[in-house]
Image (spheres, grey):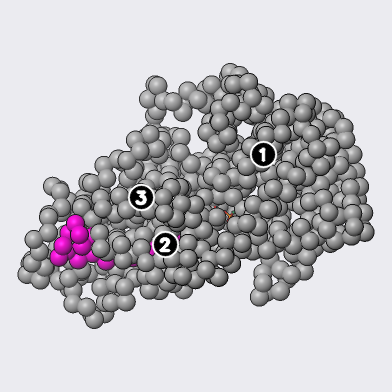
Amino acid sequence: MIPTTPMTPMTPLPLSVVDAEEITTLDDSTAPTTPDGSSSFSPNLRPQDDSSYRSVNSLSTAPFGAAAAAPAVRNVCCVGAGFVGGPTAAVIALHNPHICVTVVDRDEKRIRRWNSKHPPIYEPGLNDILRIARDGSRGCVFNDGPTNHGGSDAIRCETVSPDDRGGRCEGQKRASINSVAARLPNLVFTTDVAKCVSEADVVLIAVNTPTKRRGNGAGSATDMAAFEAVTALVAQHASPGAIIVEKSTVPCRTAQLVQDTLALYRPGVHFEVLSNPEFLAAGTAINDLLHADRILIGSNNTASGNRAAAALASVYASWIPAARIITTNLFSSELAKLVANSMLAQRISSINSIAAVCDATGADVDEVARAVGADPRIGSKFLKAGIGFGGSCLKKDVLSLAYLAETLVLPEVARYWLAVVEMNEFARNRLVSRVLQCLNNTLAGKKVTVLGFAFKKDTNDTRESPALDIIRALEKEGPEEIAVYDPLCTPTQMAEEIGHFAGPGVLRSNGGPVAVYADAYAACQGSDAVLITTEFDEFKNRPVEADGGAGNLEELPPNQNSALDAEDHLSRLNPIPLCDKDCPECQREHLNASTVSYYGTGNDDEHARKARLDWTRIYYHMKRPHWVLDGRGVLDIATMEHVGFRVESVGRRSRLTKSSSPGNHKCW
Ligand code: UGA
């Protein structure tokens, strides 16, 4: 079960002191009005006593300098249904049943998937939250303690309203009965951008801001095309006084651009702009959201700006302790996000540079990292040496910071950060060089297996994955076969992405060497060298460290806002939305399970956890001398060598392939 911190009962937030008439007087604007219906405010969730209720919108015209009272937020619209928008909106909705949360995206296919049993992204725990927030849940009662609510003592009830507590369960002692009220769906995915934006008190902009590919600043500046387009759309449709929030990672001073765009489309209408960057990481997104170490909110340092920040803070306050909510000025918040990712990348590049020194000296990079990380001023996280960082964020944000420095005529600063990216490329290239050295500088007639296609464990996200670069580099050496397996990426996905990245001609189905597998053993069968390119626990030959992440979710008794235990022991689930007969994802699942669209056995649940690999089994089906190149430091080398493998691991000592004398450590 995905736990949540029990929510304190919703108490109405302080309300505006400015009424609608006053707004008309104060805000004598000729700005275009919002589209029809936009004045309706949170229609789904309007409190029953309307007389006591005013929109956050009315606050925007309150005189500056007034005390920052948080206006009530009833409707949040998130524009962008991707890796940030989807999970963030889902967790906000889960913890704020009184808020209507809509996620809008113009991509119909993506929205259709969010509304189905096939969400477009996989994150541990996300599905459980969707089932509650998107589909609503039934009430239930159970008669046990916090830890065994899913046990056989659980009492299943079809529908239990909050007033029913205990009444249906005669014979049970009241004291032992816990009840969880039913809740209505409050998370909606739709393509109706204009309508949802116009109804929102708070609009989160969570669209892609990749690195610019062409023109001025190509390769380092941030491509703001999608962000700019969405800002213009929001500016046209937002209800007067709505709070506009930058969720996307953006260059420092973007808030000014947003403000200018709003002023351009809606002259005279007041909007507050906030920066609220996301710190969730792929694979642990739900855990990161549920247990955020900080929520950063940047605002204008004005009374109105502070009230807007307080309104957004109130949304998070449903589950995040107030002490973890950091407020700053707008530009500090924007910059802090870039700096956080850049410093994480810098740590990885630092340790990878040391891994090269270890290879050349006989030191062991894990031992160095442990010794260095024990200093609390340095810390132990993000010191795992390997083939470098991938993903859509770290590299992009370092490049964006370097570009910012360049534009500010700070070339020394730019060079400093660019070196972090250079070191990352060096780390990837070393693995390919090492494969060639191990295999006598030729791959002709040989099979190489790549284990791990995603950019990190517990995700099927492959953006900027080191594996892609490595596959492309290996392919240039003309091998007989490059076999690719990943525990979370489907063969279909891998084939599509490899074809897109390296050209369809490299795929085995088109006569090329790259074959995608659904089964690790089939991928390793007859291989000359197995490469580990993602740190999946499945590939380890030693116990998984209790290292947090998605598996670290503690168990708490359920409440109305908690997500489910996977088996729904308490029968809280409403029926899952049915797919259309011609649902492509259902068809794909069916195809994966029953046909040979790839090599190996069928995989009918693309995200099912796989068992640990049996390396002894792999050993017996590989070619001599059984090379394994561990690009992520997941293997215990001594155990592997005991089986008979020859192991190379970035910056780590091998008994067989390295001696302790410094001169013999030049290969990586
Ligand atoms: C990163 C940040 O960690 C998040 O805080 C941030 O919110 C996110 O970017 C974002 O801006 O959206 P993410 O890219 O999902 O998250 O993944 P990380 O856990 O940071 O890993 C990035 C890469 O570094 C992975 O390829 C991983 O394998 C590699 N890595 C990580 C190492 O090589 N060594 C380490 O010690 C840690």
For label 3, the residue is 225
> Mark 2 vs mark 3: which is more N-terminal?
3
Q: Which residues are magenta?
A: 262-280
Element under label 3? helix
Q: Is residue 385 above or below residue 496?
A: below
CB-based contact (under 8 Å), mark 3 and mark 1? no
Element under label 1? helix
Query: Which quadrant of the picture is home to ligand 1?
Result: bottom right
Residue lying at 68% horizontally and 63% vertically, measured from the top left: 350
Disc 2 from disc 3: Cα separation: 13 Å
Residue lying at 55% horizontally and 36% vertically, measured from the top left: 501
Query: Within the magenta stretch, is there residue 277?
Result: yes
For label 2, the residue is 251
Using the image as rendered, state which of residue 580 and residue 628 is in the foreground: 628
Image coords of residue 377 (percent x, y): 66, 75
Element under label 2? loop
- Tag 3: amino acid: Ala
Disc 1 crowd rating (10 Å Cα; few below 14, some 14-19, many 20+) is some
Asked whether the viewer can see residue 548, the reply is no
CB-based contact (under 8 Å), mark 2 and mark 3? no
For label 1, the residue is 473
- Tag 1: amino acid: Ala
**Mark in the foreground, 2 or 1:** 1
Label drawn at residue 365: none
Asked whether the viewer can see residue 507, the reply is yes
Quarter holding residue 250? bottom left
Image coords of residue 545 (percent x, y): 71, 55
Q: Is residue 602 above or below residue 627?
A: above
* Left or right of residue 437: residue 316: left
Query: Within the magenta stretch, is there residue 275?
Result: yes
